Amino acid sequence: MSGELTASERGVPAVETLELVKIYGSRRVVDGISMALPVGKVYGILGPNGAGKTTTINMLTTLLKPDQGVAKVFGHDVRKDAGRIRQLIGLTGQYAALDEKLSGFENLYIFARLQGFTSWGAKKKAAALLADFELSDSADKQVEKYSGGMRRRLDLAASLISTPPLLFLDEPTTGLDPRNRAKMWELIRALVAGGTTVLLTTQYLDEADNLADRIAVIDQGKIVAEGTANELKASIGSTSLHLRLADRREQAQAARMVEKVLRSKSTLTEESVISAPMKNPDQVTELLMALRREGIVLSEISVQKPTLDEVFLTLTGKGRGTDEKEAGHGQSDAA
């Protein structure tokens, strides 16, 4: 059977899980995850390091067997129909699955041959993908000489040799510079426009905000929130307060006061702006009076809509850099 969807497969969710569980030792790395991913959409999964994102992906792609619960891909159970599922999916993991001693062209050619292409068809497909991902000029260069961004693009190209109906992207833009990230976003949008369904895990909240139709926030193996980006933002407050101080040495004290008055988690951006969601704009007056009493001077203040960064911190209570390990894996599940 080919990688084309049958009529019955098109009539069910691309991914559907019910109380999915994976246990390592005494720890439930995935603890009762239930979700449904409609066909032709981008579904984003966010969570701190060690939340269970990569383990979930590995079960859905048949690389790991669930310990409990149900997981289906286009109606096929991951335990019973692994062969058919593998015909319908593509996977780009956190680490490139490439032979570094071969050229970019040779890598794609071999992958195409392994998927049943004729020699001529494999050459044509490899050349087309290299052009799509702006790698034609480096087609004959050994992959070990590629930059990090080039490797990620080549890895994604390899997962698209058969243009699968469902593509799993696990941290697809990690380590890319802004230009290559933007290019990758364009490629993902083009895939979805062509009918491919995408399940995306990412450590970049703006990436989920820009690409995902719906987002699940996972923490400690559980889905703690799910919805569109706007729904998630609205769930923690209608507005967000942003403060910049005249003296950065007072940021820690000011952040504690913000959290006490607004009763919400605060974040410090790379631009040294303290931000926190709030549900009652009248609290701003109370906060400003408290800051004045402590002699803390502001250089800038604004009220905006909450960001996904604030949603993430409020729901998980963790920064994105938390370095936890998934039990049994020996590598972090990068958020």
Image (cartoon, grey):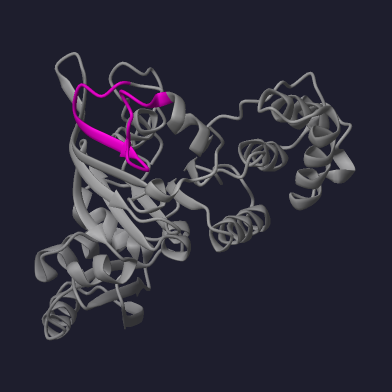
| Residue at (38% x, 34% y) in the render | 57
Give the side of residue 218 with respect to residue 43, left or right. Answer: left
Give the side of residue 138 with respect to residue 12, left or right. Answer: right
Give the side of residue 154 with respect to residue 282, left or right. Answer: right
| Residue at (34% x, 45% y) in the render | 15
x and y, in percent, of residue 262 in the image: 13, 70
Q: Nearer the viewer, residue 174 or 189?
A: 189
| Residue at (12% x, 86% y) in the render | 282
Q: Nearer the viewer, residue 34 or 25?
A: 34
Look at the image and give the residue range highlighted in magenta. Answer: 65-82
The image shows a total of numbered marks equal to 0
Q: Is residue 46 on the magenta stretch?
A: no
- Residue at the limit of the structure toward the top, as seen here: 25
x and y, in percent, of residue 17 in the image: 24, 41
Residue 117, quarter of the rendered image: top right
Image quadrant in which the C terminus is located: top left
| Residue at (79% x, 33% y) in the render | 122
Is residue 53 something that shows in the picture? yes
x and y, in percent, of residue 62 in the image: 39, 26
Q: Is residue 69 on the magenta stretch?
A: yes
Is residue 249 something that shows in the picture? no
Give the side of residue 226 with respect to residue 116, left or right. Answer: left
Residue 206, quarter of the rendered image: bottom left
